[in-house]
Amino acid sequence: MTKNKESDVFQNLTCIECGAAGCVNLHLEDFARFNCTSCGGDYTKESVIDLLNLWQAVFEFTAAAEKKTIDS
Ligand SMILES: [Zn+2]
């Protein structure tokens, strides 16, 4: 059985609203929007980027805290 590479990348995603795995789909009429078949969530690429930015801020905090621990 052959698998579609494009659909495989979506299988590893978890929904940013309910956390369900493998339920995120791309809106076929708008490639910057996603929807979740588990919770019915509907969100934009920007919402996902906002979430990633929150994590980025956490990583910067932990990197700085780690450096402080090593330096002291
Ligand atoms: Zn969901």
Image: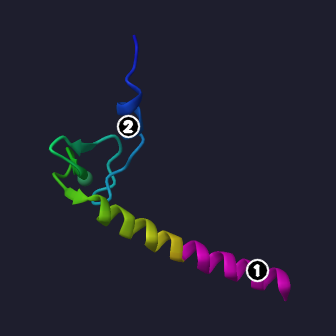
What amino acid does circle 1 point to?
Lys
Residue 35's spot in the image, x, y percent? 21, 49
Splitting the image into 4 quarters, where does residue 29 fall?
top left
In the image, what residue occupies the spot 76% across and 80% down?
Answer: 67
User: In the image as oriented, which residue stretches furthest toward the bottom?
Assistant: 72
What amino acid does circle 2 point to?
Gln
Residue at disc 2, CB closer than 8 Å to ligand 1: no
Front residue of this view, candidates 2 and 66: 2
In the image, what residue occupies the spot 45% across and 71% down?
Answer: 53
Magenta stretch in the rendered image:
58-72
Residue 28's spot in the image, x, y percent? 18, 40
Residue 17's spot in the image, x, y percent? 28, 60
Magenta: main secondary structure? helix
Left of 3 or right of it: where is 33? Answer: left
Front residue of this view, candidates 30 and 1: 30
Q: Does the magenta stretch include residue 2?
A: no
Left of 42 or right of it: where is 62? Answer: right
The quarter of the picture where the C terminus appears is: bottom right
Mark 2–mark 1 Cα distance, whole angstroms, equals 36 Å
Splitting the image into 4 quarters, where does residue 47 fall?
bottom left
Please, is residue 37 above or below residue 66 in the view?
above
In the image, what residue occupies the spot 32% across and 59% down?
Answer: 16
Please, is residue 48 above or below residue 32 in the view?
below
User: In the image as oriented, which residue stretches furthest toward the top?
Assistant: 1
Q: Is mark 2 on a helix, strand or loop?
A: helix
The residue to which callout 2 is attached is 11
Residue 21, labelled with which disc?
A: none
The quarter of the picture where the N terminus appears is: top left
The residue to which callout 1 is attached is 67
